[in-house]
Image (spheres, rainbow, N blue to C red):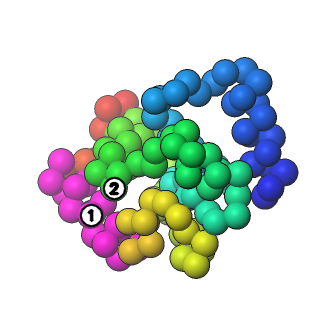
Amino acid sequence: MEKLESKVKNAIDKYGLINKNERVLVGLSGGADSVALLHVLRGTDLAADYAAGKFEVLTLEHYIDLLEQCLCVLPPEVVIHRLTGDGAKRDLIAPLWSADKKRVLNAIHAAFARDDLLQGSEL
C-alpha cells in the first residue's frame, strides 16, 4: 500500500494536480461495484500531509451528496456492494465520523429516502 500511496503522491506533486484549498474525492476499488471513502491513517504520508493542513477530509453530508451525484448517473443494472469502507479504527485519524458505520449507513439511507434517489434516474 505504501508504494501505491507514494506513487499517487508523487504524481500529484509532479503534475500539480491538486492546488491549495481544492477539495478532492479519492476512491480506489477492485472493481466497479463499490465506493470507498478516503481514510487518513496513522503512520502514512497522507497523515503527515493532513496534519500539515494540506487538505481537508469530507464531511458526512458532503460524502452523501457525492454518493447521490454518482448513483443517479450509474446504470441500474450495476450492483453496488459497498457505499463506504472501514479504516482500522486504531489507526484512523480522519474522518472520524467514518468509524461509526451504523450511523453512516443510517444517514445514507435517510438521505436517499428524503431525496427520493433512484440509481440511474438521470441517465
- On the image, the x and y values in percent for residue 32 come to 60, 49
> Does residue 117 appear left or right of residue 67 in this picture?
left
Please report the residue visible at 72 percent of the width from the left and 21 percent of the height from the top.
Answer: 15
**What amino acid does circle 2 point to?**
Leu
Instruction: State which quadrant residue 41 falls in.
Output: bottom right
Any part of residue 58 in sight? yes
Q: Is residue 97 above or below residue 47?
A: below
- 122 or 40, which is in the foreground? 40
Mark whose residue sits in front, 1 or 2 = 2
- 70 or 104, which is in the foreground? 104
Q: Which mark is residue 107?
A: 1
Q: Which mark is residue 60?
A: 2
> Does residue 37 appear left or right of residue 114 in this picture?
right
Please report the residue visible at 35 percent of the width from the left and 38 percent of the height from the top.
Answer: 69
Whole-number angstrom distance, CA of label 1 to CA of label 2: 8 Å
- 122 or 5, which is in the foreground? 5
Q: Residue at the left extreme?
A: 114
User: Cβ–Cβ below 8 Å for labels 1 and 2?
Assistant: yes
Instruction: State which quadrant residue 13 falls in.
Output: top right
Main SS type for the magenta part? helix
Q: Residue at the right extreme?
A: 3
Q: Is residue 8 above or below residue 36?
A: above
**Part of the protein shown in magenta:** 101-115
**Helix, strand or loop for disc 1:** helix
Q: Is residue 108 magenta?
A: yes
